[in-house]
Image: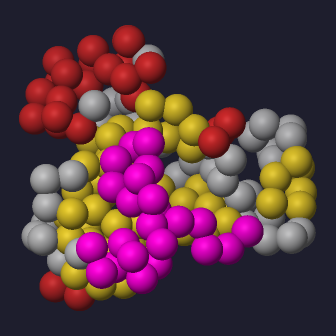
Amino acid sequence: MQKLIDRYRLIPHPEGGYYREVYRSGQTLLSPETGTKRSALTHIYFLLAAGQVSRFHKVVHDEVWNFYAGNPLKLIQYNGKDVTEAIIGAAAGDFFTVVKGGVFQAAETTGAYSLVGCTVAPGFDFADFSFLSDDPELKQKLIENYAGYRRLL
């Protein structure tokens, strides 16, 4: 796994795992969600190793996740009421999934590691990013109704 981190020059991500932005569109637009200027599209490489998790977080725009290498990735989504899971990877039979803007998500590999890509449109900006743990009411609701996912906070 260290070879992948070095090859793609990945750095630690605040939510967990490693990432590097590999594309940011030079085209800009106004975000319909925030009313602020954003790149039209961004794309990152994202790597999770066994024992690492991507903690529950959300962004305001839609994200398209694509599988590249390793073991399938489990993406968990929480809309404030229900939890759903999607698994992407060769062994799972599907190579992408979508997380709608405003939906909390978390992730973990199903094996030694998962290398995936994430495209966000309008483009990602950390100003549009927040953790579920920053919302005490929703955090408590998740813990009460889905205790098994507490480890992803």
Q: Which percent across, then down, holds residue 128?
A: 65, 39
Q: Which percent across, then down, holds residue 78?
A: 35, 39
Q: Is residue 80 magenta?
A: no
| Drawn side of residue 25 relative to residue 10, left or right | right
Q: Quadrant of the C terminus?
A: top left
Residue visible at 57% across and 38% down?
129
Q: Which percent across, then down, holds residue 2?
A: 27, 73
| Drawn side of residue 1 relative to residue 77, left or right | left
Whether residue 125 can be seen here: yes
Report which quarter residue 7 is drawn in: bottom left
Q: Is residue 19 above or below residue 77?
A: below
In the image shown, does 124 or 80 lie closer to the viewer?
124
Residue visible at 81% across and 47% down?
31
In the image shown, does 33 or 39 lie closer to the viewer?
39
Residue visible at 21% across and 52% down?
52
| Drawn side of residue 12 relative to residue 59, left or right | left
Query: Count the marks: how many?
Result: 0
Query: Magenta span covers which residues?
Result: 2-24
Residue visible at 32% across and 41% down?
55
Report which quarter residue 41 is drawn in: bottom right
Q: Quadrant of the N terminus?
A: bottom left
